[in-house]
Image (cartoon, rainbow, N blue to C red):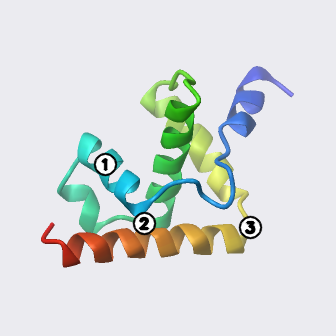
Amino acid sequence: MNAFEQTRLNLRPIFPPQITVQEIIGLLSSTNPTNRIRSLRAFDVYRLTTIHQMQNNNILLPTSNLLGIMVSRNWSTEPPEVKRIYKRLALETKAFLINHGN
């Protein structure tokens, strides 16, 4: 296994996700506050969860492009039940934002 693949596997977020709706909103606010909310998808929450986990563990984030590739590859191998949880988190986040005026 090459270094890229080893790093990619180490980036896989813990399951079940260790992130709250409020933390997702905080991460969204720091990247692109208004445009991301309407189009928030399960993959977006998965990516944010990966970033959150890396920050909490003091792991240096790779470049945006490299991070995107790694997260995308990890997402493509996740089983349906994992994807359902992230879809639910995306829906809960949207609902929270709608109900609280954002």
Q: Residue 26 at what x, y percent from top left?
A: 31, 48
Quickly name the residue at label 3: 79
Quickly name the residue at label 1: 26
Left or right: 57 with respect to 45?
right
Q: Residue at x 45, y 59 (%)?
A: 20
Quickly name the residue at label 2: 41
Per the image, label 1 sits on a secondary structure element best described as helix
Badge 3 vs badge 2, beta-carbon distance below 8 Å:
no
- For badge 1, the amino acid type reads Gly
Which corner quadrant of the image does residue 11 belong to?
top right
Q: Quadrant of the C terminus?
A: bottom left
Of circles 1 and 2, the one toward us is: 1
Per the image, label 2 sits on a secondary structure element best described as loop
Label 1 environment density (alpha carbons within 10 Å; few <14, some 14–19, many ≥20): few
Q: Counting residues from the N terminus, which is met first, the one under dot 3 or under dot 1?
A: 1
Q: Counting residues from the N terminus, which is met first, the one under dot 1 or under dot 2?
A: 1
Which corner quadrant of the image does residue 97 belong to?
bottom left
Label 3 environment density (alpha carbons within 10 Å; few <14, some 14–19, many ≥20): few
Report the front residue among 36 and 85: 85
Q: Residue at x 50, y 75 (%)?
A: 88
- Relative to 64, residue 47 above or below: below
